[in-house]
Structure formats: structure tokens, C-alpha cells
Amino acid sequence: MSLLKRDIAKFLEVYHKFDNVTLDKHNCEALYGEISVVDEKKQHWKNYKVLITINTSYPHTIPSVYEMSDVIERDWDFHISKKGACCLDITHDLILKRNTGINLIEFYRDVIYPFFANHQYRISKGHYANGEHDHHEAGIIQYYRTKLGLKDPLYIINLINKAIKGDKFEANKDCPICGNPKYKKCCRPLVNKLRLYGKQQLESDLITFNKISESKIENVS
């Protein structure tokens, strides 16, 4: 029995409102069931019908989650697509989870259930419990600013280019990005951190920051 099959069996022992269902998609396992959200006083808030699909590359994958009961308004303001695909977290953070490898029960407990609980929190309180994050290009800019402490588009572009190219540079020489002494104590830690997101995501990020840089140049001229 594969690790995914074993972990699905363990999941079903804990979460009895789910079943392992068959889909037409290859290289994928699926769970269909109901999530019952309760508040901090254990009072029932809402039920959601949910489909969870898990690629057989598990544990190095991120499950896709679809809200099937149309309880959540289909709008990116609620972190959901028109087809019901849930935006569970910031893409970059999900990539880091995928790189490390997930545990299905822990991912459900720490990511999936909180997504639906947070929806009810917003309905009740008017805002999300853990703050709001932007989507698409605005979300990328927000992530670099809040999670990496980076604001300058040109500096970010240089860091990303260095991370994508992967070329080595002597650690004790002056930094090739900003010219400060010793690359290893200057920009190398940031470059190494960016490499964790993978070439595909970095190329997408680069497009975003190139647009910002070009826009600033046009506004100046």
C-alpha cells in the first residue's frame, strides 16, 4: 500500500464525514465529504460540502480543494474561483509546504479546515481572523514586502535573476548584486531563500516586478 493510501485510511478513521471517491482523473486520489465549522464556543456555524484531490506525488504535493455546496460566494474576495477552487494560502507558502512534504491529516487540520472556518469568521465579524492577503500580481508584491521584507523592484529583479540562473559566486567576494563586502553575508541568504520557490514561480514573479519597474520608468519619463 502506498503512503498516500495509508494516510487516506488514517484520515478516514479520524474524519468520518468523508469518503474516498473515484474520479476520472489519473494520478489522483479524491475525498468527498462535509466540513462542519464550529466557533470557539463549539457552537455550530455552517456545513460545507468539499472535494479534496491529492496527486500521487504525495507527500510532495498540495491537495486541491473545491467547495461543492455553493455556500461561499464565487469571488476572489472570498479566496475562491468561479468553479469553486479554494485559494487555501499564499502560493509561495504552499510551495514551501510541498517542498518539505505534507501529512494529509495535518494539512487538513492546519490549512483546509481553517480556510472554511475563516470564511465563517468573515461572515460573522466582517473581516478575516488572520488578516487579508491580495491575489495575483498584488499578492506577489504583498508577499515579497511582508514575508521577505523586500520593496525595491529593481533589487528584487536582481535577486530573482540570480536565483533563476543559479550561477555560483565566491562567498567572500563583494556582493555581485549590491556591491557590499562578502556575498555570503549580504544577498546570498535571500537568493538561496528565493530558490526554494522554484524556477516556474520565480519567472512568474519576475514578470510582475518587471512590469512595476517599467511602469515607474514610464512615469518618470
Image (tube, helix red, strand yellow):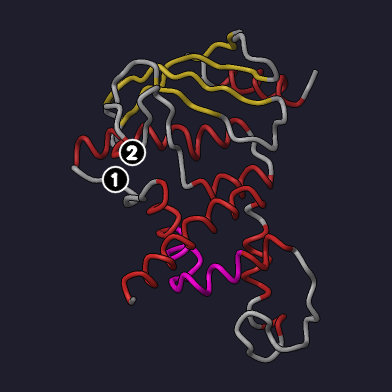
Q: Residue at position x 43%, y 37% from top?
A: 87
Viewer-proximal residue among 204 and 128: 204
Q: Residue at x 64, y 82 (%)?
A: 186
Q: Is residue 147 left or right of residue 183?
A: left
Residue 176 position within the rendered picture, expressed as x and y whole percent measured from the top left: 68, 81
Mark 2 in CB contact with mark 1 (< 8 angstroms): yes
The reply to whether the magenta stretch includes residue 40 is no
Q: Amino acid at mark 2?
A: Asn
The region drawn magenta spans 143-160
Quarter of the image for residue 105 reads: top right
Tell me the residue that label 2 is attached to. 118
* Residue 16: percent from left, percent from top: 51, 14
Q: Amino acid at mark 1?
A: Tyr
Return the residue nearer the eye: 43 or 116: 116
Q: Is residue 102 above or below residue 44?
A: below
Q: Main secondary structure of the magenta part?
A: helix
